[in-house]
Amino acid sequence: MVNNDHQVEVITANPYYPEWKIHSTYNNNFWYSEYLQGVKVFRAPLYVPQKVTSFKRIMHEVSFILGSMPYWLRAVFQKRHDVVLCIVPAFHLGLVALLYAKLRRVPLIYHIQDLQVDAARDLGMIRNRRVLSILFKAERLILKSANLISTISEGMLQKIQVKGIDEKKCILFPNWVDLKHIRPLSKKESLREEFGLKETDKVILYSGNLGEKQGLELIIETANAFLDYNDLYFLIIGSGGAKKSLIERVTKSGLKNVKVFPLQPYEKLSAMLATADLHLVLQRKAASDLVMPSKLTSILAAGGCSIVTALSSTSLYKIVKENKLGITIEPESIDALRQGIKTALNSDLDSYKKNARQYAEQYLCKEVILKRFENEMKVLKSNAY
């Protein structure tokens, strides 16, 4: 947006994700502003729990709202913005953005990366019916009041519309990928040597957030079934709330064919993805169509073949199946994952890899997606005044 001559300000937190620890360069900062690539970024303090529970996560998100209030108060008395874009989760950030939008008569775009309340209910993170009722009512207020609602998949669009939201104000704004930065590389250009792997090894990679929605315990249990396969390794790269327990399970099981490494810098992303012969995109059944895995966009751009856990009724399943981007299997099934890996190991995956890159070029290009979204914002602004 800045590159297209827009002025952009962002209210966000001090960086802590996915390690759930404030990054060292921001450790001593409370309220702090900086310029990043022409964007003025206002950073607010927040509570970051060492061990993430449902209650502590709620406190974590509420603390950010409280910490960000000085910036919102400042914005109320300064020059009016043309558009406010609220990115969720946390879903209740929309209440503050909505209040500002109403006070200053500014259009609000509510962009949903994750249907958070649905996920919290379906994953059993919140079980109290009264609490859930209050949360859904608050969500409905935001959805009804927003001028435009965007989200990242057709399945999520449908779920939003089922909540009684007019489809005319719902648009698709998918996660994009920088096709220049993330591209297919050879094994020689990968991180195999850095990870102590040979070019001839077979590598099955899970990379990204190590959280509760992914069902990562399946990897450990499945790896047991492949101990007799010479030079086959399961590589887990990333960070998140479930990382500690995952490492403990690997250590306790004594598996020699599972390797765990820290999150890699963005500059190494293409090389890291090129390390894999096969990628794993895992989700629990309860998260089906509530979360469109952003890691899949990078895998597609890198020309990778994936095993994707998805129910046949979801948009994720249809996209992967219809475009022949990878192998789809039933979520939360060790047998299905084991069989999917065996099928992949005995198959020529080149067509999947070719299709993956072609799909990314056609549908996931950063410049095309952002230009379309910019046009939506311009229309919203012109209609508002």
Image: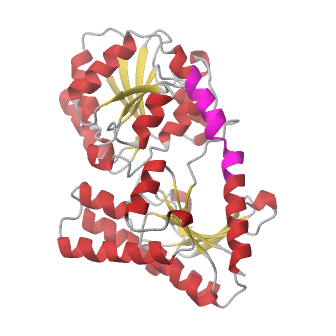
Left or right: 145 with respect to 71?
left
Question: Horizontal and vertical percent for residue 198?
Answer: 47, 13
Look at 69% across and 87% down and name the residue there.
Answer: 78
Quarter of the image where the N terminus is located:
bottom right
| Residue 96 seen from this side | yes
The answer to which quarter of the image holds residue 215 is top left
- Is 151 situated above or below 283? below
Q: Nearer the viewer, residue 201 or 150?
A: 150
Question: Horizontal and vertical percent for residue 361?
Answer: 66, 34
In reply to whether residue 85 is colored magenta, the answer given is no
Look at 44% across and 63% down and name the residue there.
Answer: 89
In reply to whether residue 369 is colored magenta, the answer given is yes
**What is the count of numbered marks?**
0
Quarter of the image where the C terminus is located:
bottom right
Look at 47% across and 9% down and name the residue there.
Answer: 200
Q: Residue furthest right?
A: 5
Question: Horizontal and vertical percent for residue 179?
Answer: 67, 36
Q: Which residues are magenta?
A: 354-370
Look at 57% across and 24% down and name the residue there.
Answer: 355
Left or right: 187 with respect to 240?
right
Left or right: 131 with respect to 27?
left
The answer to which quarter of the image holds residue 307 is top left
